[in-house]
Amino acid sequence: MAIKRIFDLLENYKTDYKELEVALAYKNKGNWIHFSAADYVKYATYFAMGLMKLGIKKGDKVASISQNMPHWNVLDMGMSMLGVIHVPIYPTISTEQYDYILRHSDAKIVIVSDLGLFRKVNPVFEKIDSLQAIYTLNDIQDANNWVEIITLGREHEEELASELEKTKASIDEHEVCTIIYTSGTTGDPKGVMLSHKNLLSNALATAKIIPVNYGERVLSFLPLCHVYERMMNYNYQSKGISIYYAEGLGTIVDNLKEIKPHAFNSVPRVLEKFYDKIIAKGKDLPPVSRAIFFWAVRLGEKYNVADKNNLWYRMRLKIARALIFKKWQAVFGGELRIIVSGGSSLQTRLAQLFWAAGAYVIEGYGMSETSPVIAVNHYRGENCRIGTVGPVLEGTEMKISDEGEILARGQHVMKGYYKDPESTAQVIDEDGWMHTGDVGELIDDKFLRITDRKKEIFKTSSGKYIAPQVIENKFKASTAIEQLMVVGENEKFASALISPNFNDLHQWASRNKIHYRDNAELIKIKEVILRIQKEVNEVNKTLGDHEKIKRFRLVCEEWSPATGELSPTLKLKRKVILKKYDHILKEIYGYPIDEGKGNERVKALLDARKISNGLNKLIPITKNKSKENN
């Protein structure tokens, strides 16, 4: 049957995929637990009926806060069958954000996965009158469990079956099925209202591109509450692909080896972590093997998917794959066919290297408001161009405004922001064009390349424009830098705040017999600053004079969603970072620093500045020829 509403995907499981033994799977206490196609349909139906018996009806909102597991899919499908609006929330945000979203969304029930989330959310639940109940997915003492809802539905199946079918028949594909709250990098989260049509138009269009089919396997580890992983999850379900949920980000490598997936979705930062680990192992090889390893890496970085390079290159690549890259494939399980990358910009060099190694990375672009894909590279042929996010997706219109902003229009564009018509009108114009806020260009009138965020481009005091993401992306190639934010709006020059890759620095310090008590002391050590200065100098060679990072400061904190500097999708929360390190910025640009506030730290930073200035004299920014410091 035609798939028009989210729950129509279940009909395929009843007919075309009814023999599928593993529709969904997760690991519990060391064992993989499988949900067959029949299990999935049965539990989702019972859950819908249970909600009906509780008095939840079409148009009501139910929130979920959970890690990835099949239970999430059962909740999601059960809600869609009933016309209930699913409000999925990140399990990593603050209590204040939970309070805001649960109030703003008008959720009637909230379902959390584990004890930690229950303890975090329960105090919020008790303060919100509109919330009727809180349930847990795991068995927690003195807490209502979601199995109670499923049991309630099963016990009243005969009574409710006919009513549920009538409700399903009444649901139109253009009705809102979910409200997804953006990560709020610039203020309170906004509730993006997406319809069945929005999500399915994207899922079915991208399904034509992904070379994975019925009964094959994918590993899922990005959060299902984010539109990217969720939409791809519908993509996989539409084809009867077995979805395995990783235990967590720390177990991805083990899970890859266990299930040997044919595909997985990723964000660039995860791929960068894979690269860092592989390169670290290469550095530990004996001299001859290390030389061969890095010969293969250098060769891989020249891979060209468009023309497949010349015969001489292909001959060398065949040798590199036999000697080195086949071992990289083993890291991914040995049967990997495709990696889908989205969420932020992927280094071109890294993409070329993965392609050369036989791990084909297709990069795409979109946003929550467009369900999410606007453009994406294809697996093979003339519709793939490394260094871009590919051609526009089928069913999507796209154009570049006179200001360079990317505009999108089509059946994937959101219904609007919940309770916020003013903000909706600011991003969707009268002709239906979604103003993305991203700046881009078309390569060969076909391939979209993202250059920056419109709102993040700033001017120096001399009137020169700086696009920070372009510069920040260049620093991602450094194994010594975990995160970096370019600053300098209305200032004389550009600078950077740098959160180092402390794992890498700890190993490097050990090899170089550098002693320190903690990260706060480590970042003040002359040799450490020298190492980062070399990285900065290398990137500065590729930048215009006004873009060069003239000063930088290291911070001893690791930036993460938990500590607030990054969004749940690992984007820089620039306002938060600017506020947190205001005293450092004042020091960089010579503004007065409040007496009595962080004096010890300021003194340390001033000392670091002296060291950095001294190093600049030793290592001229425009002439440095640094070598890798092992």
Image (cartoon, rainbow, N blue to C red):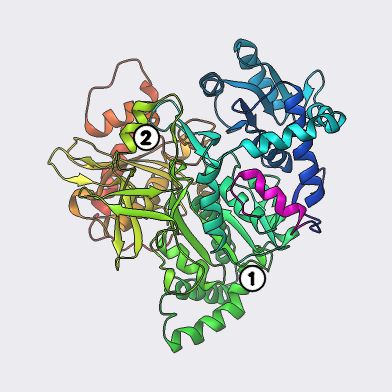
- Comparing 253 with 233, the one in front is 233
Q: Which residue is mark 2?
A: 574
Magenta-drawn segment: 1-17
Q: Is residue 26 magenta?
A: no
**As drawn, which residue projects farthest toward the right?**
155
Q: Which residue is mark 1?
A: 327
Q: Residue at x 61, y 42 (%)?
A: 224
Q: Is residue 208 above or below residue 145?
A: below
Spot occupied by residue 302 in the image (x, y as percentages of width and height): 42, 74
When asked about the image quadrant of residue 82, the answer is: top right
**Local crowd at mark 1 within 10 Å, few (<14), some, or many (≥20)?**
some
For residue 571, side relative to residue 143 (left or right) = left
Q: Residue at x 80, y 42 (%)?
A: 42
Quarter of the image where the N terminus is located: bottom right
Spot occupied by residue 5 in the image (x, y as percentages of width and height): 60, 45
Spot occupied by residue 405 in the image (x, y as percentages of width and height): 28, 48
Label annotation for residue 234: none
